[in-house]
Structures are given as structure tokens and as C-alpha cells.
Amino acid sequence: MTSNEELTAQRDRARQDYEALVARGLKLDLTRGKPSPDQLDLAQGLLELQGPLTAADGTDLRNYGGLHGLPELREIFSDALQVPVEQLLAAGNSSLELMHDAVVFALLSTLPGGERRWVEEPEIAFLCPVPGYDRHYGICERYGITMIPVPMTAEGPDMDVVERLVAENPAVKGIWCVPKYSNPDGVVYSDETVRRLAAMETAAPDFRIFWDNAYAVHHLAEEPAEIADVLALAAEHGHADRVFVFGSTSKITFAGAGVAFFGSSPANVTWWLSHTVKRSIGPDKINQLRHVRFLKDADGLREHMARHAAVIRPKFDVVDKILTAELGDTGLASWTRPAGGYFISLTVPEGCAREVVAKAKAAGIALTPAGATHPYGDEPADRTIRIAPTYPDPAELETAITGLATCVRLVALDKLLNA
């Protein structure tokens, strides 16, 4: 066991390291999972569109119409998103926008299988696996939807908790899921978790799974992770309308000029289009055509994502290498080693995350706010820090992670000594 004298000496060294860090006057940003300029350069060919502006069937794409989106593009992404082409829609540039619209449409109109509009319910609640994605929580907060945290496990949400909550409370209308390389833990849902989500009985007849498959093709390991087909399983268990699937090319091509996808049952697609037609006469089909000609087919998509992995995999390796060197044998922290996605989750001693983030900010290293991975920005245990390593160049990333490790050592050792 480490003595107080040894801990004090370690804390004093950490304090000296931190003072030197602050003196460097850094200005580094690890707040959001953005593609780096090198990744964006991979899609530069999008801007070199050649040939007639027509679809494969001869449709003039310069004109109105085509709410379903280009069939050729839906074909490219059908397997990756596990949605039949005829049940997959290609829309604007943002899947977050589609998730927002799905909530608003459900608030204002009755879902297939529902008894009334959500806005007419005395309460609406969503299950939120934690740690999770802060922008999901933002949609719920905007519309007064109660958020109920559910613990994440190594196989996905704790299904014993999920099954109990959806069975006993008709106010629970949905659950947020990032099933592959989840944000921020990098968890891949097991086949059993997906099956239980699809098969479980719910008190709300219009319960929906918001299946945000944002990282469906964002692999880092040589062997891509696979997940069970939730749409097929839901239909198999008599709940064909249960799942809304979302995805996008935001981290595949250009983050602000990509294509978003919505997939679901035929009944849900009809419901969706009946509302979308009131707000749009059709998506940007020229941009969709760019994506078709750039990616070409599903194999072209896989090859393009391999180039992405070649750019960002070394950055994930840098984070793991530095955290191992700085914190690996200290017992002061643990972190994930994801096989894909965009984030690494760093776990520090209870009650330390906010202080670590504050110390890092004071040293010029911006991180996602502590608590952002939980509903209402409140993680009671105050332990989780999300690291977004993709955007900085390697030298900046190395500096930032080394500095973050210094902050962890200082805060955690202070807490140990004051316990």
C-alpha cells in the first residue's frame, strides 16, 4: 500500500508538472468528434462531379421531387444500415435533424400502433443508456421529455433494467441507442441485447427504438464489428414498427454537406413521408448523385472507410500509448480501447471528472464538459471524461493527452490525500 508520504511526493510532482503545463500557454481542443482536415481531403473528389445530372432511370435531378432519395445511393448504404432499399430514405445532410423531426412528428401526430399523439400524454419519457450522446439529451430537454438513465454494460444497455422500465411504465415511449461503437464507450451491442430490445413487451403500444447507427462503417480494427439486424428481429417478434434507424455520411464525406438516412418498417416510412412532404418538396438530389459517383457501390464505401481508418487509427493508438505510460500503473484511471467509432472514454476516481476538465481548461486544453455524457449534464458519480482524438494533428494530440494525464494525476492524488 502506498504511504501518505509517497502519495504526497507524487502529488507534489504532479503539481510541478501542472504548473509547467499552464506556463506553456496551450490552446488545444478535444471537445467534439470532428473529422480532421486530412479526412475531409479524402472526399475532395465529391466536387469533381462529371456527367449528366440524371438518375439511373433518367430522372432530371435538377428539379423538384424524389422524397425517397436516390435509389442508387440507398442501395450503397442498405447493407451497412441493415435496412431494405425500399424501406430506406435518403434525405438532407444531418441525421440529428431526422431524429429531431421524428420526435416532433410523434409529438404532433399519432404513430402507427399508437392511441394518440405524444403531446396528449400526461408524461413522455425516454430511456438513456449512460454514458451516452449529449445531443440526444438535448432533443429530449427541448421538448420536455423526461430522461431515465440506464447503465451501459459491455454488451449494450442493461437489458434487465430496460425490460423492467418499458414493461411497467406506459410513459416510456423510446430509447436512444448507438448500437455500434457507442458514443463514448465504443460498446458494440451483442446479438442477445439486440434480440431482447426487439422482442421485449412494452406498456406503450407506440414505443420506438431510436437506432442511431452513426458509426456503422467507422471501423478501426482489422475485423469489422457486426451487429444483429434489429429491424428484422423486431418484425420476427411481432413488433415491426418498433425501430427507427438513422445514419449519415457526416463523418464519411463532408460533415456539413453529406446525406442522412432514415429507415424503418413500411408503415413507419409511409407515416414519415406523410409529414415530410409538408416541409420539403425533395432533398438535394445533386448532392446525392455526387455521393453515388464518388463512392460507386458498397465496396467503394468500404474502401473509402479503410482510408479513414488509416488516418485516425494512429491517433487512437497515441492516446492509448500515452495514457498507459502516464497512468497505466497508477490505479488512478481506466479507459476504453474501442474497435471503431470516434471516442475514447476515460474513467477517473469518483468526484474527480469536473475538476480534471476544469484544470485542463485552465491549462488551455478544452474537453467536452464533464457530465455531458449523462442526461441533464449530471453524472452523479462524476467519473466520465470523453476524449475526441480525431481532429487534432498527431503532435497536438500527444501534447493534449499528456497534459490531460497530468491533470488526472494532480486531481486524483489530491482527492486521495484529502479523503
Image (cartoon, rainbow, N blue to C red):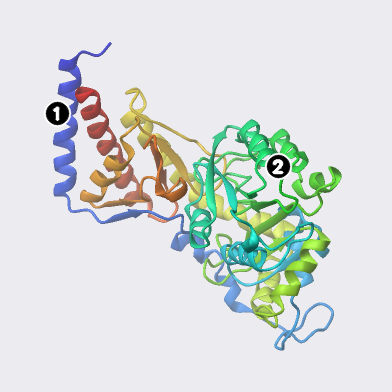
Q: Mark 1 is on which residue type?
A: Asp
Residue under label 2, please give it: 227
Residue located at (43% from left, 50% from top)? 376
Does residue 68 appear in the picture of this structure?
A: no
Q: Is residue 133 left or right of residue 203?
A: left
Quarter that holds the C terminus? top left
Q: Residues within 10 Å of mark 1 (few under 14, many from 20)?
A: some
Residue under label 1, please give it: 12
In what element is the residue under mark 2?
Answer: loop
In what element is the residue under mark 1?
Answer: helix
Would you place residue 398 above or below residue 263 in this image?
above
- Circles 2 and 1, Cβ within 8 Å, touching? The answer is no
Q: Mark 2 is on which residue type?
A: Ile
The disc, 2 or 1, on the residue closer to the chain's N-terminal end is 1
Using the image as rendered, state which of residue 204 and residue 379 is in the foreground.
204
- How much space separates mark 2 and mark 1, taking CA atoms? 47 Å
Does residue 288 appear in the picture of this structure?
A: yes
Using the image as rendered, state which of residue 148 and residue 214 is in the foreground.
148
The x and y percentages for residue 112 are 78, 60
The x and y percentages for residue 182 are 56, 44
Residue located at (22% from left, 33% from top)? 410
Q: Is residue 201 left or right of residue 210?
A: right
Q: Residue 117's quadrant in the figure?
A: bottom right
